[in-house]
């Protein structure tokens, strides 16, 4: 693996350790390091809570959204495949 060293010379990383160090240095410069959050930071406020309190779900809307699922998509944050949810709709 060829790379340019800090002094501007072309170098060759031949061992696995050298390659890992080159890649680590490259990717650490590409990504932004986010500051650590304080433990005292509140991630929500009262407006979020009141908005969630007004949230209602009815059977008709739920069935409509389930019938519109693309069964060929990957899982969502709930780790359920859309095909399983769609099959549950057909079982009703």
Image (cartoon, rainbow, N blue to C red):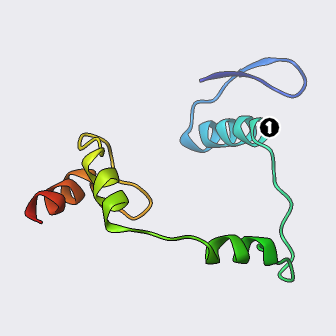
Q: Quadrant of residue 47?
A: bottom right
Q: Secondary structure at mark 1?
A: helix
Q: Residue at x 80, y 37 (%)?
A: 29
Question: To which quarter of the image does residue 54 belong?
Answer: bottom right
| Residue 1 in the image: above or below residue 46 | above
Which quadrant is the C terminus positioned in? bottom left
Q: Position of residue 23 (x, y in %)?
A: 65, 37
Looking at the image, which residue sits at the far left? 91
Residue at 90% in and 24% down: 7
Relative to residue 15, is residue 9 drawn left or right?
A: right
Total number of numbered discs in the rendering: 1
Q: Is residue 44 above or below residue 12?
A: below
Q: Where in the figure is residue 71, as x and y percent of width and height?
A: 23, 44
Q: Give 73 or 62, whichever is nearer the viewer.
A: 62
Locate residue 37, reporting x and y percent: 83, 70
Q: Nearer the viewer, residue 22 or 75?
A: 75
Q: Quadrant of the N terminus?
A: top right
Residue lying at the far bottom of the rendered structure: 40
Q: Choose between 28 and 10: the one closer to the eye.
A: 28
Residue located beneath label 1 in the image: 29
Answer left or right for 89 relative to 74.
left
Mark 1, residues whose alpha carbon is within 10 Å: few (<14), some, or many (≥20)?
A: few
Across and down, in percent, residue 69 comes to 30, 46
Residue 45 seen anywhere in this rendered image of the structure:
no
Q: Residue furthest right?
A: 7
Q: Residue at x 73, y 71 (%)?
A: 48
Looking at the picture, does residue 22 appear above or below residue 39? above
Q: Residue at x 73, y 34 (%)?
A: 26
**Can the viewer see residue 85?**
yes
């Amino acid at each position: 693996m060829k790379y340019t060293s800090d002094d501007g010379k072309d170098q060759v990383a031949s061992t696995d350790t050298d390659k890992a160090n080159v890649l680590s240095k490259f990717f650490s410069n590409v990504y932004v390091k986010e500051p650590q959050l304080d433990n005292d930071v509140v991630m929500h406020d009262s407006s979020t809570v009141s908005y969630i309190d007004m949230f209602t779900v009815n059977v008709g809307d739920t069935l409509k959204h389930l019938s519109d699922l693309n069964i060929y998509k990957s899982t969502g944050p709930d780790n359920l495949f859309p095909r399983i949810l769609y099959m549950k709709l057909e079982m009703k």
